[in-house]
Amino acid sequence: MNFPTDLKYTKSDEWIRVKGSEAEAGLTDYAQSHLSDIVYVELPEVGAEFKQGTSFGSIESVKAASDLNIPASGSITAVNESLADAPEAVNSDPYGKGWIVKFTLSDAGELAGLMDAQAYEAYCNERG
Amino acid sequence: MTYIPHTDANRTEMLEAIGVKSLEELFPAVPDKVKFPELRLPAALSEMEAFWEMQGLSEANADVNHYACFLGAGAYNHYVPHTVDYVLRRSEFYTAYTPYQPEVSQGTLQAMFEYQSMICQLTGMDVSNASHYDGATSLAEGVLLALNATKGNRKKIVLSPAVHPQYRSVVRTYTQGMGVSIVGDNNLKADVADLVKLLDKDTVCLVVQSPNFFGQIENMQGVADAVHAVGALLIVATDPIGLAILTPPGKYGADVVVAEGQPLGIPLSYGGPYLGIFATKNAYVRKMAGRLVGETVDSDGKRGFVLTLSTREQHIRREKATSNICTNQGLLALAASVYLATMGKCGLDQVARLCWHKSHYAAKRLGNLKGYSVWNNKPFFKEFVVKMPKPIEVVNEFLLDEFDIIGGYDLGRDYPHLKNHMLIAVTETNNKTEIDDLAEGLKEAAEQL
């Protein structure tokens, strides 16, 4: 199980990578391993705005469908179109090629409330 | 035949195991006086007597095998070939339940897959589900798909008043409490051009029926473009027989196509059960409600069928599911499949052409009667409207009593501006004599009533 230390994490299993006021988000390794084979990712429109914690899309595997919640408020600048043909990238490379959205942060202060890699790993361990 | 598997010995054994002396001891909460109340039922009938009683009741009804039928308005007297019953009454199909376990349900699943495939061919759409209850609920599900597809950000549904009144009512039932507004049919005389003017960025969908409730074929040129230009969806309700000779909605840009499948090998049955046809584009398949059968291969590489995309359904997505309905009309979808396979492309074309020719002959004959006029000003398929010199209820009673004819629908019931207008349906089952008798009956009605 992979918990990159340069990322922050949400309780609903999304990760966020921040570069200045730009951010990138996706689904964690823990979540993809529990969902199993991803078959579809529903992406938002570029330009759409979301408040922290609200659903910006959804992700479907053969056995379940989950909402994807944005780790911090912002407006979408890019979506990973390649997931339409290769949704399995979320399974094989959740922190790299499996990125889901890129967005501009509207309130960097919100990041303080997210978990770091250590806290998230502990959170995953207690859930089993 | 006994339906309760327990023997007295079983019961004694069970009672001993729980330390109870008799069954009665298990029901102390039920007061004695209601335990075995006197039921005032008539004496039991023998099978012979029961049969006579039921036969008498059924013969009190006028049915389409004994009366000429010109009543349509959403359910039509089309011929049902005997192949339909022959396949349906196989107990494997007749008693089959939901195919959740594909290993033992390949017959049902394959039949549904064939049904879905034929519906796609007929409608010109990419994907069909395994059916809904009826045309009305299919239409409501189409509206829900559109609401879902526009991500809940839009609230206005533009609904043509020429859509079947009961379908419009069901759409309202389904969307109550959702904070949507339904416009368009507040003006019962509005035509498609008027409705297009109502489209804006708050529009979820435009809902149109063609052939419409009055039998008329709507001019859909440019309509899909106008709807898509504002980011809305076009939903078209249609007639499955008509699809044999009319341009299928998929070809003029419909996003969702729905229909009542009753004309496809399903008897009238006094209103049901019927068949909700639902087809859409690939882009919307994950937002489509209902069961969906998919083709796949098993672990030996052999072709097989399963229910698929189940993550849309409420047992997985719960309140975020595409619909609260999670069923289909399996036996009737099978009837439709057998009908379509029996008729084939040429046969269905022939049925449609017969409907067209006979209805147009009827319109010509009735339009020539003194005091009667045909109301339709657009091309029609198998139904048309006639303005009559007497109230429809009175005319129909006269036709039934004097001519053994079941007359058409009284449009005044739903469209006040169409009081004394009758909606007449003519199908391949109406022969020339019946149509001439109808003309004769209406002529006399004008003279005698």
Image (cartoon, coloured by chain):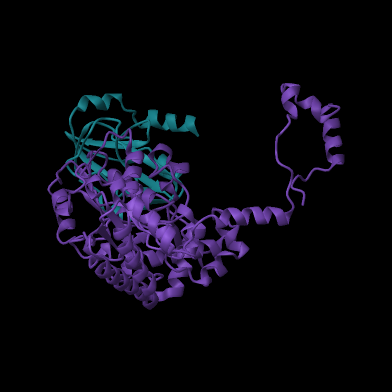
- Residue A46: x %, y % from top left: 18, 44
Q: Colour of chain B?
A: purple
**Vertical placement of residue B88 versus B154, above or below:** below
Q: Quadrant of the N terminus of chain A?
A: top left
Q: Is residue B25 left or right of residue B115?
A: right
- Residue B422: x %, y % from top left: 30, 56
Look at the image and tell me whether residue A87 can be seen: no
Q: Colour of chain A?
A: cyan
Viewer-proximal residue among A121 and B440: B440
Q: Is residue B207 left or right of residue B301?
A: left
Q: What number of labels is visible?
A: 0
Q: Who's the residue at 48% across and 49% down the image?
A: B327
- Residue B11: x %, y % from top left: 83, 37
Q: Who's the residue at 22% across and 24% down the image?
A: A109
Look at the image and tell me whether residue B36 can be seen: yes
- Residue B45: x %, y % from top left: 73, 49
Q: Who's the residue at 19% across and 62% down the image?
A: B378
**Vertical placement of residue B340 versus A71, above or below:** below
Name the quadrant containing residue A114.
top left
